[in-house]
């Protein structure tokens, strides 16, 4: 899972232990899929800088969308940064890219702003996973780029879809952009879904892969430096018996994923900083 990339596409300029980069992310994802069959790849929002009038930022956001398309994301929920890009941006990108957007509680003129509230994926092990997209109403309270936009309360939305998805899926994932307060308020929703697993844009406020009762908390450290991973183990009846979570650092020592590197070339954007601050061979 990824979230809070904030438009970062290449390794950070850190003087020690530089991390990040879409091409490094692509390599880790490819390696995970080579070793695991039952994998879901999710984005919980704020992958962009949210700067609609900046031409450089727009080019980089297009590159991110192309890369996510190539990586084969299973579900993407927008964050407030993507909403800040405005209505015209959304219309253009939904036509230009084939990406699995999901959000159940974002409305415009009382109609869903994003067509799909959820996606159901059938994994090779026959596990049916429903991914329900949500965004915290508090995140959009100051956003004016899209007129007549509203957000339904998260608890109301979860209750609306819980009984429907419980009949269609074995596992329900809430893919959510959350404030810390929104994260704290979700715990009571375990009474309405068989399992509650979510990530969001609160960065390190949420621990990684923690199982409490039936609630799995999952989040990724921000700015594109890490890839979040949660491994779930099921018994023969389909009940979760263990969860392990980690944030995988995207080290500059990783090789670049070739298809993602080609996307950089096509967009005419350097895949590394023009003045390298780290030698991967050292």
Image (spheres, grey):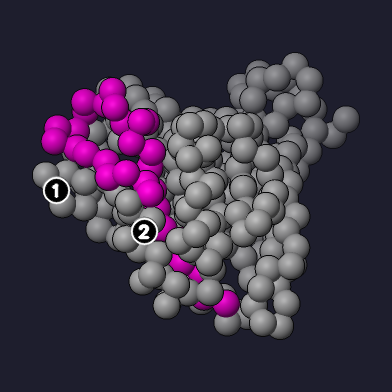
Q: In the image, is 200 to the left or to the right of 28? A: left
Residue beneath the point at 62% across and 48% down: 217
The kind of secondary structure element at disc 1 is: loop
Q: Is residue 134 magenta?
A: yes
For residue 44, the mark is none
Q: Quadrant of residue 231 in the image?
A: bottom right
Q: Quadrant of residue 50 in the image?
A: top left
The kind of secondary structure element at disc 2 is: helix
Residue beneath the point at 78% across and 38% down: 253
Q: In the image, is 152 to the left or to the right of 264? A: left
On the image, the x and y values in percent for residue 257 come to: 64, 50
Q: Is 78 in front, or is 6?
A: 78
On the image, the x and y values in percent for residue 224 come to: 59, 35
On the image, the x and y values in percent for residue 11 come to: 64, 30
Q: Nearer the viewer, mark 2 or mark 1?
A: 2
For disc 1, the marked residue is 110
Q: Is residue 47 magenta?
A: no
Q: Which residues are magenta?
A: 127-155
For disc 2, the marked residue is 159
How far is the residue under mark 2 from the one under mark 1? 18 Å
Mark 1 closeness class: few <14, some 14–19, many ≥20 residues within 10 Å: few
Which part of the image, by quadrant, shows the C terminus? Answer: top right
Q: In the image, is 207 to the left or to the right of 158? A: right
């Amino acid at each position: 899972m990824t979230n809070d990339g904030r438009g970062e596409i290449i390794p950070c300029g850190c003087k020690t232990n530089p991390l990040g980069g879409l091409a490094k992310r692509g390599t880790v994802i490819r390696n995970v899929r080579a070793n695991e069959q039952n994998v879901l790849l999710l984005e919980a929002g704020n992958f962009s800088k949210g700067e609609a009038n900046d031409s450089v930022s727009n080019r980089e956001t297009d590159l991110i969308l192309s890369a996510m398309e190539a990586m084969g994301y299973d579900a993407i929920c927008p964050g407030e940064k993507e909403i800040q890009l405005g209505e015209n941006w959304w219309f253009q990108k939904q036509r230009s890219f084939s990406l699995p957007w999901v959000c159940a509680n974002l409305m415009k003129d009382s109609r869903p702003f994003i067509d799909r509230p959820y996606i159901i994926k059938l994994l090779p092990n026959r596990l049916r996973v429903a991914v329900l997209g949500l965004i915290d109403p508090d995140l959009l309270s100051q956003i004016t780029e899209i007129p007549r936009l509203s957000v339904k309360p998260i608890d109301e939305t979860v209750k609306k879809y819980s009984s429907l998805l419980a009949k269609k899926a074995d596992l329900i994932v809430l893919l959510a952009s959350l404030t810390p307060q929104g994260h704290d308020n979700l715990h009571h929703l375990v009474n309405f879904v068989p399992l509650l697993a979510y990530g969001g844009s609160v960065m390190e406020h949420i621990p990684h892969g923690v199982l409490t009762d039936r609630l799995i908390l999952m989040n990724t450290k921000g700015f594109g430096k890490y890839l979040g991973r949660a491994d779930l183990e099921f018994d023969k009846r389909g009940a979760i018996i263990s969860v392990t979570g980690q944030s995988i650092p995207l080290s500059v020592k990783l090789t670049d994923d070739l298809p993602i590197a080609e996307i950089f070339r096509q967009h005419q954007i350097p895949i590394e900083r023009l003045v390298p601050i780290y030698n991967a061979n050292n």
